[in-house]
Amino acid sequence: MSDQRRHVRTPFSCSIKIRHESIGELMVKTRDISDGGVFVILDPQHVPPIGSVVTGQVQGLMGDAPELKMEVVRVEPTGVGLRFIAADATD
């Protein structure tokens, strides 16, 4: 399988709160991040289906971080790849 990524991934660990109707609200850790998305470490049984849109918010900042919409684009045994959705793409 060829690597079709458009953005360079950078190892990065932080806590993110993600929400989706099928999983509720979960605190997860990131594995890496890029300009296009983020990979979060998550038990495969808690992964919403590919194509699902989740809401995510970085935790542990001085103030409240913005909530971002992200689409599930890849599922692996250790977690899920989420693509950032532009704010105006969901309006």
Image: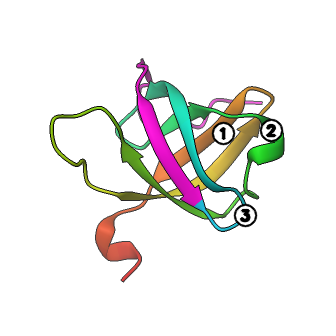
Q: Which stretch appears magenta?
A: 1-19
Q: Distance between the Cα atoms at labels 1 and 3?
A: 15 Å
Would residue 54 be seen by someone viewing this image from the given angle?
Answer: yes
Q: Which residue is mark 3?
A: 22
Give coordinates of residue 38: x percent, y percent: 48, 37
Q: Which residue is mark 2?
A: 44
The disc, 2 or 1, on the residue closer to the chain's N-terminal end is 2
Element type where label 1 sits in the image:
strand
Does residue 15 show up magenta in the picture?
A: yes
The disc, 2 or 3, on the residue closer to the chain's N-terminal end is 3
Amino acid type assigned to the residue bearing label 3 in the image: Ser
Does residue 44 show up magenta in the picture?
A: no
Element type where label 2 sits in the image:
helix
Q: Is residue 38 above or below residue 69?
A: above
Q: Which residue is mark 1?
A: 80
Which quarter of the picture shows residue 23?
bottom right
Label 3 neighbour load within 10 Å: few <14, some 14-19, many 20+: few
The residue shown at (66%, 68%) is 21
